Image (cartoon, rainbow, N blue to C red):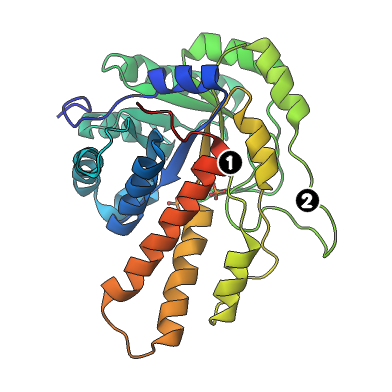
Amino acid sequence: MTYKELGLVNTREMFKKAMAGKYAIPAFNFNNLEQLQAIIMACVETKSPVILQVSSGARKYANQNLLKNMAKGATEYAHELGCDIPIVLHLDHGDSFELCKSCIETGFSSVMIDGSHLSYEENIALTKKVVDYAHQFDVTVEGELGVLAGIEDEVSAEKHTYTRPEEVEDFVKRTGVDSLAISIGTSHGAFKFKVKPGEAIPPLRFDILEEVEKRIPGFPIVLHGSSSVPQDIVAEINQYGGKIENSAGVPEDQLRRAATSAVCKINIDSDGRLAMTAAVRKVLAENPGEFDPRKYLGPAREKLKELYKHKIINVLGSANRVE
Ligand code: G3H
Ligand code: 13P
Ligand code: ZN
């Protein structure tokens, strides 16, 4: 089944509108039913387009056929809730041509080929191969230049290798990618910056972003690693028996600023994980006899929905963008 038959769209039109309207599309990861329900409820209630992201780990965890049919179900669920929001099913951090091809065959409408750990020329060759294949099926492709610090799907890097603006034009031209993820100081996970108490989090490198924009004007840029790691949620986890120390994320005002630039897609996963964990811990700590998963996953889903609505309205600016 093609993604169009599943009721999904690719990112092309979405990014064009996001660029013109100076906002960013939320790219939320999902692995299970409750995460998907929370995403769709939040996006319908705020009238926001959305990118549903599946990592290769999520694909292993949840099964690709189930995920595909969940995405199909998501389009029907959105309709039932009263708003046919545009929905993309996107492979997050694809690491091989074969994985991208398999996802395209399964019904994904967009794939990321992450060649950022390869040499520049190898990255170009691999990305172009995926683009040439994907475009035959009108599937859009995200590439990456520069390496984020932290863990990227089992590959970890000690330090950022910031994107080199002098490479982006050549990369985009030679690969034919539809969007480009860049490294300007964000990183994956809940421990993004090693700052001492009272020390400020280092700001994102907006100078690099501006230089990139100058070289490829109007081209959609993607920010990975954009969780803000809300400290009230971390405190709630710790209050109810968790132990998360020295966590830090990207301040939301910086992401708000990025969303008004050529950044058209902002990836958020860790914040959702934290919100769900806080809610589950609270319910179980307060009701030690509870063993019905709906009784703790239900509140987790509710907290997740509220988090996503906040991101959409106050950070990404993607609310009320669907007629
Ligand atoms: O960038 C990675 C995403 O947060 C997905 O994480 O590979 O653990 O599913 P995962
Ligand atoms: P966070 O870990 O900051 O949520 O980043 C998610 C991401 O980039 C998924 O590709
Ligand atoms: Zn990522």
Is 163 in front, or is 320?
320
Distance Cα–Cα, label 2 vs label 1:
18 Å
Where is 85 relative to 77, above or below? Answer: above
- Dot 1 amino acid type: Val
* Residue ID for mark 2: 201
User: Would you call the spot at circle 2 few (<14 residues within 10 Å), some (14-19), or many (20 or more)?
Assistant: some
**Nearest to the observer: residue 53 or residue 15:** 15
**Would residue 136 be found to the left or right of residue 115 on screen?**
left
Q: Position of residue 197 (x, y in %)?
A: 82, 65
- Farthest bottom residue? 289
Q: Nearer the viewer, residue 315 or 100?
A: 315
Lateral position of residue 210 relative to residue 124, left or right: right
Quarter of the picture containing the C terminus is top left
Which disc number belongs to residue 166? none
Discs 2/1, front:
1
Q: Measuring 45% from the left and 70% from the top, which residue is drawn there?
A: 279
The answer to whether one can see residue 263 in this image is yes
Q: In this rendering, is residue 241 above or below 106?
A: below
Image spot of residue 162 (x, y percent): 71, 32
- Residue beneath disc 1: 315
| Label located before the other in sequence (2 or 1) | 2
Nearer the observer, 239 or 108:
239
Q: Position of residue 149 (x, y in %)?
A: 66, 45
Give the residue at x 65% y 32%.
258
Q: Could you tell me which residue is drawn at 64 percent across and 39 percent down? A: 255
